[in-house]
Amino acid sequence: MRAKPGSGEMLAELGKQLESDRPPGMVSVFVYRMDANPDEYMMAVAFESKEAYEANAASDEQDRRYRQLRDLLESDPEWNDGEIVHVDGPVAGPSEAPAGSPA
């Protein structure tokens, strides 16, 4: 996703809000700022199950979060759904997960 110039800090704040406003079933979030363009970001989000992901995607609360995010972007983000097939390293549970959905 490409942030509007100057909105990177607000984008980071939205990610931090997930610490206290974590959707049910969300396990972890990774937000990457691209070296080649500091206004480009990638976000990877993991849920405990596909059902938890789909329930979040259909919720009014996620629609509100998405609209806040979209206001900070130049265009709609590219969205890619998938399944985690390998993890190497510690896996955080819902209460331990770092804060920070489209890629």
Image: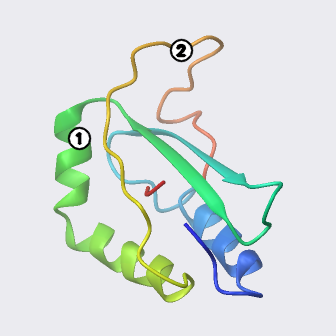
Question: Residue at horizontal 80%, vertical 67%?
Answer: 38
Q: Give the vertical position of 23 relative to 9 (above or below).
A: above
Mark 2 or mark 1: which is in front?
A: 2
Question: Residue at horizontal 70%, vertical 84%?
Answer: 7
The quadrant of the picture occupied by the N terminus is bottom right
Residue that mark 2 sits on = 87
Residue type for callout 2: Val
Q: How many marks?
A: 2
Lower sequence index among marks 2 and 1: 1
Residue 59 screen position, x and y as percent: 20, 65
Q: Secondary structure at mark 1?
A: helix
Answer with left or right where residue 54 lies relative to residue 47.
left
Q: Give the vertical position of 65 relative to 67 (above or below).
A: above
Q: Secondary structure at mark 2?
A: loop
Density class for disc 2 (Cα within 10 Å; few <14, some 14-19, many ≥20) is few
Residue 60 screen position, x and y as percent: 21, 73
Q: Give the vertical position of 53 relative to 73 (above or below).
A: above
State the residue lying farthest toward the front: 36
Q: Nearer the viewer, residue 10 or 102?
A: 102
Residue type for callout 1: Ala
Answer with left or right where residue 36 lies relative to residue 89.
right
Residue 75 screen position, x and y as percent: 47, 81
> Which numbered tag is attached to residue 52?
1
